[in-house]
Amino acid sequence: MSGDASAGGVSDLRIAEVAPLGVSVPPVTYGGTQRIVHFLTEELVRRGHDVTLFASGDSKTSAKLRVVRKRSLLPDINAGKVRRPDFYAVHSIGEALREAGSFDIIHCHLGPWSLPFHGLSPTPLLHTLPGLVYEDDLWMLRRYPEATVIARSRRQVAGLDGHCPNIRVIYNGCDFEAYEFSPGPVRYLAFLGRMAWEKNPLDAIAIAGQVGLPIVLAGEPKNEYEQDYFAEQIEPMIDGKNVIHIGEVTDAQKNELFRNAGALLFPVLVEEAFGIVMIEAMACGTPVVAYNRGAVSEVVDYGKTGFYADAVEELPALVTRALSLDRQTVRRHARQRFNQQRMADEYIQVYESLVK
């Protein structure tokens, strides 16, 4: 630990942030974990910490960039040139450990991949779980109960049943200044996510039809299975009027999508770890209507920033209620809970506890 007090009265830290290599930091379109890493890294730099980001060479950051691979993996995965992306995750950890003496803390956003290195590093390691936790992840987590692990929601690690006492929940945050507020009027309903069964654009289309509003779908299928689903279930319903598909969106396009939407539909069918698109929509003042799966009840404040239900069939009635919510209140309340400053505060507390 070096230097005097930085913003917020926190001593300067030398921090390594190790990002997944699937897409760049920040992502151009798809990539929730990389977006969170970007928000956190930029806030840490703004506060005066000495931050090194281990990421792909197409990343853009205010921190020092350590290029682990010249470009992100996803294009080469899609082209069949990369078949073992796991190797690159291990390599990223190895690169950070090679420079361990230069850091006070190494923060890995790769999930359980970094856990076996926990006792091998002279520098404290922090491990954040980026997404869904499967049985294999639970197996690994139970093997390293002494490791300090960050979950994105309580629901994400519900299956651990107290096996890992050092797990702490830090909710995602975003830069609310990067999202533009709009008071309305309602033009359509929005859906943002992969065109995949588990993201459930099919029910989103049905909900919009029942409430008599057009729906704009943003996102693309990401593999052969999802392409078949999209071609068979979704594409035949796209008419350019009631059901509009705009593909993957940049940050500017996402802003426009959410700004002009009456509500974001989030009828996800799996146990999502968080769902950053929900707080991105709220940042524009757009409420969320969701199926109560995964972390939805931890992210959406019922009656304030949106609504959720235990059955998808209940969602159309909730859309009407969501459209009457005050959008200023939606943004203000979400900002209190999910701003990047709060996220950075909580991570810094963990960093300092590990360094001490």
Image (tube, rainbow, N blue to C red):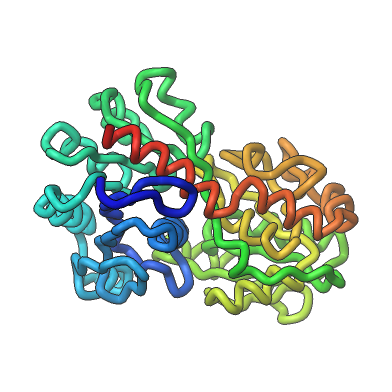
Q: Residue at x 45, y 59 (%)?
A: 43
Rendered position, 68 above or below 355: below
* Point 63% across, 38% down: residue: 298
Please state, as top left, top right, bottom left or bottom right, where the C terminus lies in the image: top left
Quarter of the view holding residue 303: top right
Q: Position of residue 37 (x, y in %)?
A: 40, 57
Residue drawn 83% across and 68% down? Answer: 183
Query: Of 307 and 2, which appears nearest the observer?
Result: 2
Q: Residue furthest bottom?
A: 240
Apparent side of residue 220 relative to residue 318 in the rendered image (left or right): left
Q: Nearer the viewer, residue 141 or 219?
A: 141
Residue 198 seen in this snapshot:
no
Instruction: Depth check: give the residue in front, 287 or 318.
Output: 287
Q: Position of residue 247 (x, y in %)?
A: 56, 76
At 53% across and 74% down in the image, what residue appears?
Answer: 248
To which quarter of the image does residue 291 belong?
top right
Is residue 100 in sight in this rendering? Answer: yes
Residue 72 % position (x, y): 29, 70
The spot of residue 349 in percent (x, y) is 42, 38
Tally the numbered discs. Answer: 0
Quadrant of image for the N terminus: top left
Q: Is residue 199 left or right of residue 312?
A: left
Name the outermost residue toward the front. 4
The answer to whether residue 49 is left or right of residue 279 is left
Q: In the shown orientation, is residue 205 left or right of residue 120? A: right
